[in-house]
Amino acid sequence: MNPRKFPRRRFLQVAGITALGLSGPTRFGRSLIQMPRELFFYIGTYTTGRSEGIYLCRIDLDTGAIALVDVCKGVSNPSFLAIDGERRFLYAVNEVDNFEGTKSGAVSSFRIDPGTSRLEFLNQRSSKGADPCHLIVDETNQYVLVANYSGGSAAVLPTRNGTLQESVSFTQHRGSSINPERQEGPHAHCVVLDAANRYAFVTDLGLDQIKNYRFDPRTGSLVPNSQPFVSVKPGAGPRHFVFHPNQRWAYVINELDSTITAFHYDAVHGRLKEFQNTPTLPVNFSGKSFCADIHISPSGKFLYGSNRGHDSLTVFTIDQEKGFLYPIQHTSTLGKFPRNFAIVPGGKLLLAANQNSDNIVSFWINEKDGTLTPTGRSVEVPSPVCIRFAG
């Protein structure tokens, strides 16, 4: 973006700065503006208990202090959230198994107020499968891709100026794996696009597979790739999937056996090849625990995973030549059942969402070794599941 092509006020609005607290002068061209001291972020929740919907909070980047700002009420189980690349619209799954009399969940869309970051409801569409649990927006901002957990399927919904349209692509997974309680059928858990917006990967916990699709951003279609899937260890239960910033490696965190599987990524053909599998738990831990989320630092040097049961975040350093993971820390999330977590833009802070203790806790990230230290700051939010930053 060239700031000279925008009036000063309009440029700051597009950059998302008018919605933030300001301090610390920095130069943009010849203009002196302020860098933000605070950031707004949203929290997706389960509304089956005390939660009222999607919560809006802000974090002080100097102290790690978190404050509750607002709540968008009347949204059913908005457990996972996604924001378009222009930061104009927010999309939320409605993790339910009945929508308008059909065995399906839904996706809801909201307009983001550029001045306050508050949400305005736009519309809602069927996700084409029960209990949608994850969604993303493609690079063109024209499509929302959603994974349906109980439905064991994935769908693509077009969006027009933030308003969702009926699905234009749908794929149903079939099969099972070795765990009779959790893998009796397909359970799509996550959908991720590569940086080129050409290949879509859908992790299926029930099949122990990562499904591999060619994605057409002109039509929104999903078609099985020449490598239609890659398997992980039987009983592993792949959950969330992430690409390294260099797009040479990818990593999946496995919920059921508490491991991370690393892959080489062929970006030309959209193919994955496993090269490492490593545990997320300390060797002396003997209780029950289930992995949830996975993220990589903006520098690409460190990888983080969450453990529900051990109630911790695992920190790995990433070999910058070959992509191998080496564990360096296990730290308590200072709460129970950590679900999603998020690295604050800039990489100084991490926020952990503890679903069963109803709190969000902030941590400092050591930029040299990637280790985490609690800031001593937190905020109470009922059943927090997902964190997404407004700017």
Image (cartoon, rainbow, N blue to C red):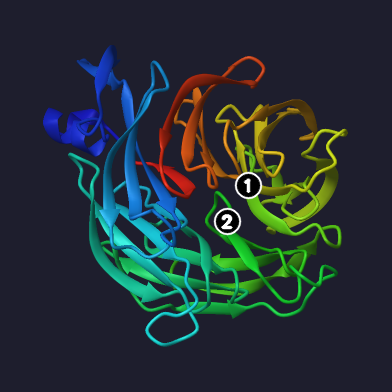
- Local packing at callout 2 (Cα closer than 10 Å; few below 14, some 14-19, many 20+) is many
What percent of the width, then of the height, locates residue 118? 23, 46
Q: Residue furthest bottom?
A: 101
Q: Can residue 7 be seen in this view?
A: no
Dividing the image into 4 quarters, which one contains the N terminus? Answer: top left
Residue at image coords 83%, 41%: 278
In this orientation, which residue lies closer to the viewer: 63 or 382? 382
Residue at image coords 52%, 56%: 197
Q: Which amino acid does label 1 sit on?
A: Val
Image vertical order of residue 80 relative to residue 104, above or below: above
Dividing the image into 4 quarters, which one contains the C terminus? Answer: top left
Does label 2 or label 1 sit earlier along the sequence? 2
Residue at image coords 38%, 70%: 158
Q: Name the residue under label 2.
A: 192
What percent of the width, then of the height, locates residue 303? 67, 34
In this orientation, which residue lies closer to the viewer: 322 or 129? 129
